[in-house]
Amino acid sequence: MSLKSRLMLALLGLPMLLLTLLAGLSMYQENALRRTAMQNQIEGAVNLMAPQLGEALAMNDSSALQATANQLMDSPTIRALRLQRGTQRILEFGRLRGHALSTTTPSSEHRLTQYYRQWVMVVPLEQSPDAWLILDIDASLLLLANYSNLARGALILLVCGLLLFLVAFSISKRVTQSIDDMSQLIDQLANGRQPPHLNLNQPAELAQMAVRINLLADHMAKARDDLQHQIESATRELQESMETIEVQNIELDISHRQAVEANRVKSEFLANMSHEIRTPLNGIVGFCRLLRRSSLDQRQQEWLDQVQRACSNLLSLVNDVLDFSKLEAGRLVLEQVPVDIQSLVDEVLGLQAPLAHQKGLQLLSLVYDDVPPQLSGDPLRIRQVLTNLINNAIKFTDHGEVIVRVMVEEAQNERITLRLSVSDTGIGLSDIQQRRLFQAFRQATPSHSRQFGGTGLGLAISRQLVEQMGGSIGVDSTPEHGSTFHFTISLTGNPHLERNPELDLHQHHLYIEEPHGPSRRALLHFVTLWHATTTDDPDQASLALEAISADDIEGERLILLRQRLATRTCPTLLMLNAGLPDPASLTLPLHAEILAKPISRKVLAQAIERHLNNPLTEVSNSAPTSTSAIDSGTPDARLLIVDDSETNRLLLKELIEGPGRALTLAASGEEALALAQQQDFDMVLMDIRMTGIDGVETTQALRRMSDKWRERPVIAVTAHVLESQRRELLLKGMDDVLIKPLDPAHLDELLQTWLGISLNTRGEPAPQLPPASIDEELPTVDIGLGTRVAGGREALAKQLIASLAASLEATEQDIDSAIEQDDEEALLDAIHALNGACRYCGVPRLALLAETIETRLRSRGMQETLTMLPDLTNAMEQLRQWQQQHSSEVEALGANANDSSLSSEQ
């Protein structure tokens, strides 16, 4: 309730209540007096007339009765009367109503009964005991007087109420108006306005309050002015700061752009420098290979090994720096291609096996059964991380074992998190060394860099690669008790997909002799998975698996091994923890084969199946080759070689051709597609840059041809490929890359990986040449180098050089045409084709120039390359001159080669 309402209630309500009570009391008293006066008047008249009526009745005087009754009826309040004796009516004036009619019972005493509008009086007559008088008295006049009195009182109360309302309203308005003014002033102060001062002409209390509110308003106005001044001052300072920050932001943006540009220039510089560094390094490696063919003593051979090792380390350092630079710049893009973790781990262990064999370490991979056979991820980066961890484990382990474990850590829908760990029994790490281990350019201790080599970039790159693949990397280690490096990666695939067993060995018993506990448990797991049983008696076994060391194939121990194998009735797979020796030096029994550890699951299954299906077939101990295909004439592998250079096709054919292999040659992408529609092939070797449809377009067309072609391995063959270009080729459908000049070991590795076959080294070995003389520049032709590239066939080497010399005129025309038309892409095609052709021939000077020009053309552009073209033209002219001088010799060698091939066919 508001103050105004309370004031109105106090000033109006209470007085009105008192006046109402007083008026009511006054009207009640006046009504009582009026009633008493009327009663006294009637009783006085009756008391006066009753004796006269009694006497007249007693004397039976009718006229007297009549006269007396008339006198009573003259009273204005008496409406009717009746004189009655018993039940006999003696006299009646008027007509009795209501309650008067019901009064028939005689009464011995005076009685007056009052009703609302009617009074009834019964008066006994003393002079006639059995007679009484009944009077009907009208009380309406009394009621009218009361109503009149009530109306007069109400009117007086109304007038008083109006007067009181005016007084109360005036007082409340005077009080509340002052309070409203104060409230409005406070509202204006709250809204930040400066209101006028309050009027002090008010009651003392309100005036005192107004004075204080005016003081408060003045104080707030002063405070507001001070605050406004401070705000303006702060705004000016903030504006100055904003301007300074804007200038700094502009400077920062300029610095950022300069940093980005510097980083781009740095990346280009690193890429260009890496190419420039790789070119002389490749030359050094080539010369080292040439020197190996010359007569070297033991000391010179060690020096040569040191040179090759230094080149390999330098190339590894260049690759690490490039990867670290890409990771820093955030430009490393991960691939999403099919990945077989089992094959990937086996491949990495196979590449690291020679270093482990030198130390006598046991290498083992344990891929758990819950790991799906097909996942999707970046195999190159997984391989890079795994290679680094395994290489470190071997490097810091002098004896014992290195075990790689792969398991599923978490699987949600199609997102699978794999946990890969590399455990070793090496020197271990302390807690302090573990904390700084994954920092760039840091190793566990400074002495490790001197003792074991390395830059400290490998683990830093591995950490960033793992984090980009949605995982984490860590290490658990105890000094002198080995280390376990573990990392997780997030891949996609079907978690419910299981690997099918490679073999079904029901009713076969295997004898296993493996002293290394983890390797033995892994073999027992494979035996159980393939439904075979084990036996402790080799004479009762279908096949024996026996682990041997390098000492077991030397001296007397080799003789004892031969004797033990000769007495064994079952085929035997010897698991050698060392590199494979020369099969000719072993002369093992027909049913024995040597496999070098670590043995992949696929290779082990193929070897077991081969021996159980053909237990008496002689098996080459250098590379497994099926003889059933040779005997029956059905090829083990059908290969399609696609290259627009006849020289390249010829060399690939000569290197791969052998028993059990059917080779088909195609000179263009169109021809390859036509052959693919007519025949089925197990592998395609595809040149990348060809006229018409190039290698990438041809591969994509093959992939679209049918479902089987989506699974066929297609290997890109190219003379010049960077790491980024290699990844791009893999994304466009290639399965692997083979770089010219062809390295027989790399080619053999690819054939084993994708087809399970190995190269046959046929023909006569390369002749021993006298020590090479040291000239000021590379020779135009090196027959020894060409012979080595041609697989030891000198005649083929000279034929390849002749084919190259014959194509130089067309190459020169292509180069001149590209320069005249300022067509950098055409110039790159011509140089690339020349570079690829040189890779197959012993022309070191022309090969080095072609490689250098192609590298510079890719990295710097056409204008930076034109200065080197005269040297290239000179080198091509010198090669043509050499060919003219030795043409007769080449023709003779070609004729001899044809005769020998005809005689072999006959």
Image: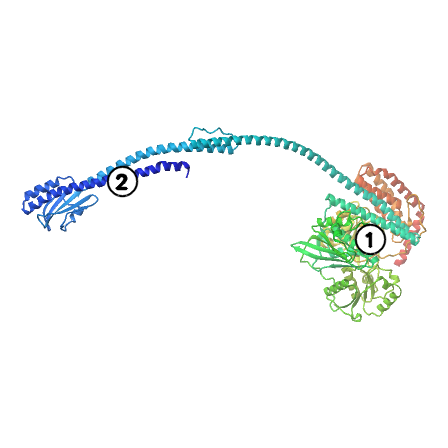
* Dot 2: element: helix
Q: Are marks 2 and 1 in contact (CB under 8 Å)?
A: no
Q: Is residue 701 visible?
A: no
Is the residue marked by circle 1 packed among few (<14), some (14-19), or many (20+) residues within 10 Å?
Answer: few
Query: Residue 662: x percent and y percent?
Result: 81, 56
Above or below: residue 640 compared with residue 205: below
Q: Which mark is residue 746?
A: 1
Amino acid on which the number 2 mark rests in the picture = Leu
Instruction: Report the front residue among 724 and 750.
Output: 724
Instruction: Report the front residue among 872 and 877.
Output: 872
Q: Earlier in the sequence, mark 2 or mark 1?
A: 2
- 2 or 1: mark nearer the eye: 2
Amino acid on which the number 1 mark rests in the picture = His
Q: Which mark is residue 340?
A: none
* Dot 1: element: helix
Query: Residue 553: x percent and y percent?
Result: 86, 63
Quarter-wise, where is residue 846 in the image? top right
Residue underneath mark 2: 25
Whether residue 682 sits left or right of residue 56 in the image: it is: right
Whether residue 622 sits left or right of residue 82 in the image: it is: right
Instruction: Report the front residue among 130 and 530.
Output: 130
Whether residue 209 sits left or right of residue 784 in the image: it is: left
Q: Considering the image in quadrants, where does the N terminus appear?
A: top left
Q: How many marks?
A: 2
Quarter-wise, where is residue 43 in the image? top left
* Separation (CA) of disc 2 from disc 1: 132 Å
Query: Residue 55: x percent and y percent?
Result: 7, 45
Instruction: Report the front residue among 624 and 894.
Output: 624
Q: Considering the image in quadrants, where does the C terminus appear?
A: bottom right
Q: How is the image coloured?
A: rainbow
